[in-house]
Amino acid sequence: MNLTAFLRENWLQICVLWREHLVLVVCASLAAVGLGVPLGIAVAKRKAWRGPIFAFANVLQTVPSLALFGLLIPLPFIGGIGARTAIVALTLYALLPIIRNTATGILDVDPKVRESAVAMGMTDWQILRQVEIPLALNVILSGVRVAVVVAVGTATIAAAIGAGGLGTFIFRGLRQNDNRLLIAGAGLSALLALLADFSCGRLANLFREGKVREETSRSTDRWLAFAAVVLAFAPVLLSFNAADGTSNVAGRRKVVVGSKDFTESVILAEILAQSLEARGVPVERKFELGGNLAHDGLLAKQIDVYPEYTGTAFTAILKYPPMTDTDAVYEKVKANYAERFQLAVGPPLGFSNDFAILVRKKDADERKLKTISDAVPVSANWRAGFGQDFISRADGYEGFRKAYGFAFSKPPREMDLSLTYRALAAGEVDIIAGNSTDGLISALGLVQLTDDRHYFPPYQAVFIARRTATDDNEVLKTVIEELKLAISTDDMRRMNLQVDGEKKTPREVAAAFLQTRLKPAVSSQ
C-alpha cells in the first residue's frame, strides 16, 4: 500500500490524532500565554526578578522533553498518564519565548513615550495597559508565534505517555518499521506547524507597529488567518465520526485497558479489550505507554489492566536478581504484586517473550553461528546496539556481557529498541537484543542465537490488574482466566508479523485471533 492509499484508508484515524494534537497545542499555548505574559511584565518591571525567572525558563528548555514528561508523571494533581501531564509539560516548554519577548517588547518602548505618559498624569497601570503593551504587542505576538510552533513539535513526544496526537504515528512507524507511518506523522505535524505559524504571523501583521497599513492589506491578513485556522480545525469536525478507542455500553462499568509501546503488548491488550466488549463490557483503551508507565498507571488507578512479562516484573519492578526457574519467578511475582501493590497477576498466557540476541542471517550462515557462545570469538570488532531498557536492567547488558565473556572493542550504541532492528538490518550494528516473538525478526531476515548458558530469566506473558478492578468486575476476571495458555509462541510470532510485516492493524489481528481460537468461549457467553 502506497502513502496515498494509506492516507485515504486511514483518514478517520488521522483526523482523531490531528484533533488530539491540536487540543494539546491550543490548551498549552493558551496556558503559556496566561502565565508567560504576566511573568514577562514582572521581569520588565522588576529588575531583581529577571535572573531567577529567566533562569527557570531557560532550565526548562534544556530538560529533554521525554524526561520532563517522566518527571511530571508522579506529581499529584498535574501528573499521571494522558493529556493533562502533556499539557503541563508543553506549557512549561512554551514559556521562555513568551516571557522573553514580552519583557523585551516592554523594555524597548521609547523612554520619552513613557515620560510623556507620566507627564499626562497616567498611573503605572494605565501606562502599562494603554501605552507599553500596545507598543510591545507585535514583539509579544512574535514570542507567542514561536511558542506555538515549539508546542506543535514537542507534542509529538506526548504519545509516549498516552496523550495521543500525531506522534502516535511516528512511534508506531519506528516500532513496526513502517515508513508510511513515519512520513504521515512527521508530515502532518509539519503541516500543522506551518498552519499555526502562518495564522499567528497573519494575526501579528494586524498589529504591526509603525505606519497605518492599508485597509485592503489588513482585510487580506484577516481572511488568510481565518482560512488557516479553518484548515487547522476542519479535521476536528471530521474526527467525531471516528471511534476514539472507547466503547460505550449503558449500565456497565468500563474497564480501562492499557498496553506498553510495542506491537505485541498492543495486540495482547486488544485481545483482552475485544473479549470484554464481546461480553458487553465497555472498554477504554490507553495503549502504547512508554517505559513503566503502564505499571505506574495501575498504581495511580488510571488503568485497570495491562499485559506484562514475569521476568520484567521480577527484575525491573521488584528489583530481584535474575532467576531462571520459570515457576519460581511466576509465584514470586504473583505473591509480591499482591502484597506490595494490591495487584492481581493473571495466569500465563501460554508463551514467553524472552530477550533475543539477534544477528543478520548472512553473518550467521557465513560464520556458522547458532548459539550466543558461538558469537563471542568473532565479535571483538562487532558494533553492538541495545535498547535503553536492556542497557539499564539488572538482567541486561552488564550481566549478559560478563556471563558470556563478550569484549566489544567499542561501547554498545544505546538507542530506542525499535531502531535497533533497523540498524542491524542496515549494517549499522552487528548484534542486538530484541524480543523472541517479534515479527521483525522474520520480516528483516534476522537470526536469533540460542541462550546456551541460560542467562536470561523467563518472560512469561500475563495480564496484571488492579485487585479492586477484578473484584468489582467478574467478567474481567473470567476473561483473564479464559486466556490462560490460549496463545502459543507461534501464535504470537504470527500475529506480530501480521502487524510489523504485513501492515495489518492490531485490532484486525486481535479480532482474527479471537474468531479462530476463542470463538467457542466467546459465543457461549
Image (cartoon, grey):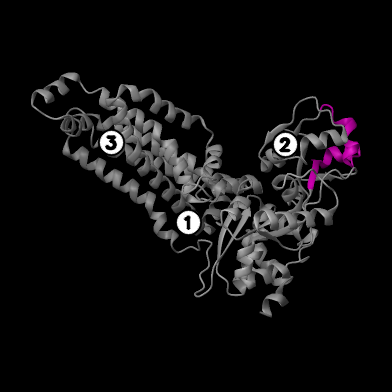
What label sits on residue 16 in the rendered view? 1
Q: Is residue 446 magenta?
A: no
Amino acid type, callout 3: Ala
Look at the numbered disc 3 and give the secondary structure of its residue.
helix
- Nearer mark to the viewer, of 1 and 2: 2
Measuring 78% from the left and 34% from the top, which residue is drawn there? 398
Looking at the image, tell me whether mark 1 or mark 2 is earlier in sequence order: 1
Q: Is any atom of residue 502 visible in this view?
A: no
Q: Residue 268 placed where, x, y %?
A: 68, 60
What residue range appears in magenta? 355-381
Q: Which residue is mark 2?
A: 391
Tell me how far mark 3 sits from mark 1, CA to CA.
Answer: 29 Å
Amino acid type, callout 2: Ile
Above or below, 106 relative to 404: above
Q: Badge 2, how many Cα within 10 Å: few under 14, some, many 20+?
A: many
Tell me how far mark 1 sits from mark 2, CA to CA.
Answer: 35 Å
Q: Quadrant of the N terminus?
A: bottom right
Amino acid type, callout 1: Val
What label sits on residue 204 in the rendered view? 3
Q: Badge 1, how many Cα within 10 Å: few under 14, some, many 20+?
A: many
Measuring 50% from the left and 75% from the top, which residue is drawn there? 251
Look at the numbered disc 2 and give the secondary structure of its residue.
helix
